[in-house]
Image (cartoon, rainbow, N blue to C red):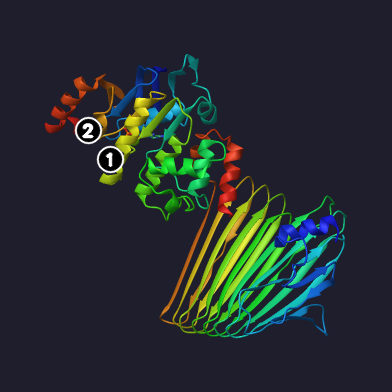
Amino acid sequence: MHETDQELLAQIAGIRGFQPGTAFNLRQNGEGVERHSTPNIQITPKSDQPGINIHISAQTSEEEVHIPVILTKSGITDVVANDFYIEAGAKVKIIAGCGIHNDGCDTSEHNGIHTFHIGKNAKVTYIEKHYGEGNGDGKRILNPSTVVYMDEGAYMEMDSAQIKGVDSTKRNMQCHLKADAKLMISERLMTHGKQNAVSDVSVFLDGENSSVRIVSRSVGKDESVQVFHPIAVGNARCKAHIQCDSILMDQAKISSIPEITANHVDAQIVHEAAIGKINSEQLIKLETFGLAEEEAEAVIVEGFLK
Amino acid sequence: MLTLSNLSFQADQQEILSDITTSFPDGSFTVITGPNGGGKSTLAKLIMGIEQPTGGSVYWNDIDITNLSIAQRAKHKIGYAFQQPPRFKGMSVKKLLTLAHGKVLKHEQCCEYLSAVGLCANDYLNRDVDQSLSGGEVKRIEIATLLARDLDLAIFDEPEAGIDLWSFAKLVETFQQLHQNKKMSILLISHQERIMRMADEIVVIENGRIARRGDRDQILPSLIQDFNSCEYKK
Ligand SMILES: Nc1ncnc2c1ncn2[C@@H]1O[C@H](COP(=O)(O)OP(=O)(O)OP(=O)(O)O)[C@@H](O)[C@H]1O
Ligand SMILES: [Mg+2]
């Protein structure tokens, strides 16, 4: 693998290549280039369309699957559908993510559709990082779609981050929760320049005692634009808590448009949103340590998105 | 030496501090007291550069620092512990202490600063200085950030507020030690008699002016007398 490929991998997945003993699928410039299964985690290519099926057996306990995608050629539009079948009781950590290195003048675009079928009482941690770099004028576009079906008692922790270099992103997420399913979503986003980010997240709480917690932290810099549209629908006794916190800098614009619906008398749905400048007291506090204003801002933003 | 010369501050067409002229010698321990809204915190903020005076000057070691930024004053080894410290999302206690210190902090040093304010490092170093900490915990961490710095002038704004009796005793001990080392000048804003008893001098600020100033033994008895006759609350 090239140095830049390894760098991209490190940015999005914290690894520089295949880790023996783990399941691994690397997709580069629209093609699967390296694939490894384990006895518990079987990765097979789809026969009818680009993408893979990932079968995670009930015996899986604390195993990791890496399925990074990298785009290093300019002018590629990659569309891929990956399906995850996680058997009842499995415990697994899935590390996805997409990195684009675009030195050319054409658009590089990746549209990934991830569908999760999470069995009863299975426990899934899903980490997804998006990152763009390169010196060309070509745009770097990422449009991730995620569909999640959670069976009874299933648990999922989803952690997505996009901190740098993606010009345009439209995230779409649809989650369906059965009884006692629990979903924790943490989303971190920073946009700069003329970047544009839209996030549509819909969660349907269909089963008794299902619950979701969404924590979204974002920072908008320069002339970037962000729109959040979280939707929670409570169709049973359930709990939903959505918290969107944003720091606005320069000429950036951020909108948060929550939609919460309770179709059951015991549905408890809360949405909190706050958008504002960096807290001036925090800045002053750090300046009293001798930090310049820009340094203080950087420290606050870094912590906020940690 | 810190010298204030005809220092005034107005906000919303109101005179909040008027014509404050005084000085604080090196290594001195001065308690500033007086009724709520008298202008004590405002004075501290003028010294730290957080507010700009509408008149007069601040001199530090004979240098006019009136137009220096907060960060520049920090580099002159002046520090201020806020009356109401801000909280930070995603900032650990360790990170905050490290930023205050200005370079990498050893675990033992963190322990030293935190135990000086009655906190156990193992319980707190990795916690975030956010809403999850109690008011008294945030206050004590704020004091620890000043201990982590190398200061010539430390200003503490009501450090005892909201702090339990056990930790208060520990704080008194810490201030006593700071004073004995004589390495820095201390300005301590307080309403506590126990803290005033440590001071070399006491300054009473009322209605934006220095109403009284003198040795502890001279001012404290009159303050207690006033307090008993409700004069202090006037
Ligand atoms: N920026 C400002 N704009 C308007 N009024 C202000 C400003 N700063 C301070 N004040 C007012 O000045 C007065 C003095 O405030 P300050 O905080 O200095 O009092 P204090 O002596 O520290 O009181 P306390 O004992 O309650 O802490 C108060 O009436 C306050 O409302
Ligand atoms: Mg005050």
Looking at the rendered image, the quarter that the N terminus of chain B falls into is: top left
Disc 1 versus disc 2: distance between alpha carbons?
13 Å
Would you say residue B227 is visible in this rendering? yes
**Counting residues from the N terminus, which is met first, the one under dot 1 or under dot 2?**
1
Q: Amino acid at mark 1?
A: Ala
**Which chain does tag 2 point to?**
B
Where residue B148 sits: x, y (%)? 47, 36
Where residue B62 sits: x, y (%)? 47, 14
Q: Residue at x 12, y 32 (%)?
A: B228
> Viewed as shown, does residue A207 lie left or right of B39?
right
**Crowd class of label 1 (few under 14; some 14 to 19; many from 20; radius 10 Å):** some
Q: Which residue is mark 1?
A: B169
**Crowd class of label 2 (few under 14; some 14 to 19; many from 20; radius 10 Å):** few
> Viewed as shown, does residue A128 lie left or right of B76?
right
Looking at the rendered image, the quarter that the C terminus of chain B falls into is: top left
Q: Amino acid at mark 2?
A: Glu
Please tell me whether mark 2 sits on a helix, a strand or a loop: helix
The disc at residue B193 is: 2
**Looking at the picture, do discs 1 and 2 lie on one chain?**
yes
Residue B93 or residue A146, whichever sits in front? B93
Where residue A115 sits: x, y (%)? 68, 79
Question: Which residue extends farthest front?
Answer: B108
Q: Ligand 2 appears in which quadrant? A: top left
Q: Please determine whether, in this image, residue B62 is positioned above or below residue A241.
A: above
